[in-house]
Image (cartoon, grey):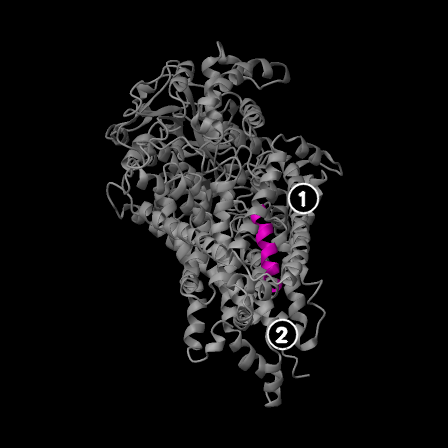
Amino acid sequence: MKRRRFPPILPILTLLAMLGPVAAGLWGTVMPAFGHLPAAGITGPSLDPFRDLFDWAGLPRAMFLSISTGLLATGISLAIVMLVTAGWSGTKPFRALERLLSPLLSVPHAAAAFGLAFLIAPSGWVSRLLSPAFTGWDRPPDLLIVQDTWGLTMTAGLIVKEVPFLLLITLAALGQADAQRSVAISQALGYGRVTGWLKTVFPRVYAQIRPPIYVVLAYSMSVVDVAVILGPNTPPPLSVQIVKWMSDPDLAMRLEAAAGALLQLGLVIGALAFWRFGEYVVGRLGARWIASGARGKFDGVAAVGALTAGAICALSVLFGLVVLAIWSFAGFWGFPDALPDAFTWRNWLRFGPGTLDALGETALIAITVALVALILTIGCLEAEYRFGLSFSQRAVWLLYLPLLIPQTAFLPGLQTLMLSLGADVGRLPVMLAHLVFVLPYVFLSLADPFRAWDTRMGTIATALRASPDGVLWRVRLPMLLRPILTALAVGLAVSVGQYLATLLIGGGRVATLTTEAVALASGGDRRAIGVYGLMQSGAALVPFALALLIPAVVWRNRKGLRHG
Amino acid sequence: MKHLAVLAALLAPVPALADIDPANWDAVTAEAEGQTVFWNAWGGSTTTNEFLAWVGSRVMEDYGVTLEHVKLTDTADAVTRVLSEKQAGEDDDGAIDMIWINGANFAAMKEADLLFGPYAEQLPNWAFVDVDGKTVQTDFTVPTEGFESPWAMAQVVFVHNTADMPESLGSMQALLEWTQANPGRFSYPQPPDFLGTTFLKQVLVDILPDPAVLSDPATDENYDEVTAPLWAYLDQLTPNLWREGKAYPATGTAMFPLIADGELDLSISFSPGAASTAIANNELPPSVRTFVLDKGTIGNASFVAIPYNSGSKAGAMVVANFLMSPEAQARAQDPAILGYGTVLDMDALSDDDRALFDALELGVATLSPAELGTVQAEPHPSWATRIADDWMDRYGVSE
């Protein structure tokens, strides 16, 4: 069988690469959660860890923060992205936003969070620019903005990053949704732009971007780095508290951490179920709304409002980068001066050499991991297509497990597993650990566009005597160039942003830009944070720029493929 | 003292795995050459990171030892790591060769037999260490017994911006009264950050009529009674803290930008020279000064320890020994570099070496050794652990 160039072994390999570590890591979590940790001299089973967990006075608040942050960040981000796309897709402002997408997406969560903090804190740039002329402040006001009790700043920090992510995913899906013609027809029937889009295109787009939305929800609920920078600390969200318990020198605290991790997992599952129920409700209401034939009265308001919100998100990240840049060159910068007393190279000379070492390590890991993930993903999808494997429906949810399970739940268990296998800590295990997270993201990004590809193209090519491989290499992959590059860029960005996996599995020996930046973050040196934040953003900028640029160049004379 | 230590080392049973003998220094340096030492140390201070990089270049030059600084956010991560390696049976070549450590982390590792040693008092430069004048053989009252070697002295100082707060305060009671008159202008790092916990200990040591009770382990019988004044104090202090105590700075250095912006007038530091260093790096305004309390402030030593499963013990000992050298100690004390207190006895040094220290400009905000006054002993680690836990229950989940 010479044709079997893509044996079904690739899907199995892919599943193993992702689920093996997760299953083992979970095992390493479940055991201590039920009181079994021989290393600490504690043998179970017992329910004591859960008893301790529920005795913690901060638990209700920590759980509330996890849920509220996740639902608010996901819901608001989704609303902004859908309304902006509905109201402005194909217009000038939308194309401007599209061009901004690469820099916005490339900024790692931690850097965006720092930028936002440097902007909106009582001593932030906004306050400096307005003071003392408009505010009368000659000292920063004692206001609880960053680390606010309700986690709203943290939620905002997530929204500014999730909006570009969802927009990118939406753009990748739009090419398959036949949006332009649908909107044209609905407008011809008298529907408003937004209403027409929501009634005709939204259901198709949502079906394609649903998995990334679930991932955003799970991620927002269990994020650690953004929460540490912007979130409250009295008490912190559950995920941060789990990491704190995990690093307690008292090994017995790991039991409580494990119990908390299982609770976090339960919260995420519950929130996903709630969201799924919400989809059902929105679907029913939407069907009625469509049947009512309303043409849309508030289209203008909704479109302008969403564009404003989207612009604020974009500007927060971009001006966050600007203020990071200013700090990286700042001499002494007192409040309420709008700019530092002096600009200096001193900070870059101090921290620059360190960032270059970390950049090399970051790039090596990210490129290797993203490429492997891409090859496995295409292998899986092509195998599914050729052999009609039943991999697609229920089994595919296994792919999302690493993204839906809080990292804190299985990474320490994973560390123990690798050690007991005799696998040395270092770069290779870190790559394998990154693959666990990168693979699903690459798969999530690519699967729907890949499956939504019009197979009649393949039929035509086959009729023209192309082999299955020929169809893949000469028709399918070129047509899917843009989603493939998008998936690759997402994979790179995910790898660049990994913190816990790098730290735990690398045994601290693998120093990437992210681990170095987060280590510096606890010291609060804004100049160092500025330098590392910019370098981190730069490391992720290039791939996203290429993901937009290359299709535009390659398909400069194939208009229909540019957004495909 | 030194001879006793050597004798003790000779009489100690030979370890089963034939670990290198610290007393045979030639063998140590021979084996160290070419080794790579992964030093796990808190990475939140850029000045410290730069000092560690310099140490790396020096031990490479003199001994051919490669030093890699693994930057931690929390030293407990390293402790956890060694523990999980032991659990997994990785006994010969763990990820960590050296840890910057003291206090509860050291007590936990020593208790669990996770450390290599004794080695510290066999190192050649131990001869220069001020054994009598500085607390280098006990760590938060726990005897070190040669399982960690000292490399820096720290003492609590209060950092104030004289532009907004000209006065210095003599006691914790005075600090409380000052915050009542100036709400929102003082904060401390959130426990269990070590500096935040130190602040709590400093309060207790200062307001207790007799802090001697703290040198013994806390017991269930005496803990509530001894710490009651601390909680009463904090209940009064918290509403007048920065952000009304609803948020706290993460670490000590994270308070520098708050002072620079004018959000805080007063904070606390565990490094008498850190303020001068931060002024030099534009992180603090030049009007910042430091002070200590009338009854003195808590001080302790920073140590390095070597995990039992390090694969580069000889290299780690070479680094530990270099850290105690007059060259490294003088550089660490230079406020333009690091501003850490030395562990060495000036009288034990040669004239040339002493001149290195005499030549140092202590810096505009640094108190002289005389001005630093009495160093109060750290309480037994059991106090810090329980106080930090209690603080988290009382104030860490207040909202």
Direction from residue B266 to residue A21 in the image, left or right = right
Task: Check the picture and name the quadrant holding the N terminus of chain B.
Answer: top left
A245 is higher (above) or lower (below) than B165? below
Q: Earlier in the sequence, mark 1 or mark 2?
A: 1
Residue A57 location, quadrant: top right
Please tell me how crowded label 2 is: few (under 14), some (14-19), or many (20+) other residues with Cα within 10 Å: many
Amino acid type of disc 1? Leu
Q: Residue at x 36, y 35 (%)?
A: B257
In the current view of this chain or complex, which residue is farthest to the bottom?
A464
Whole-percent x, y for residue A554 in the image: 43, 77
Query: Residue B64: x and y, percent?
Result: 39, 49
Q: Give the chain letter at badge 1.
A: A
Judging depth in this view, the residue of B337 and A313 nearest the camera is A313
Q: Amino acid at mark 2?
A: Glu
Q: Is residue A538 visible?
A: yes
Q: Residue at x 63, y 14 (%)?
A: B221
Q: Start and end of the magenta stretch? A: A207-221
Label 1: which residue?
A262
* Residue A157 higher or lower than B137, as above or below: below
Residue toward you, A539 or A112: A112
Q: Is residue A336 magenta?
A: no
Q: Which x, y percent locates residue A438? A: 56, 59
Residue A211 included in the magenta stretch of the image: yes
How far separated are the C-alphas under marks 1 and 2?
35 Å
Q: Does residue A499 lie above or below B257 as drawn?
A: below
Question: Are labels 1 and 2 on one chain?
Answer: yes
Q: To which residue does mark 2 refer?
A: A382
Nearest the viewer among B120 and B80 is B80
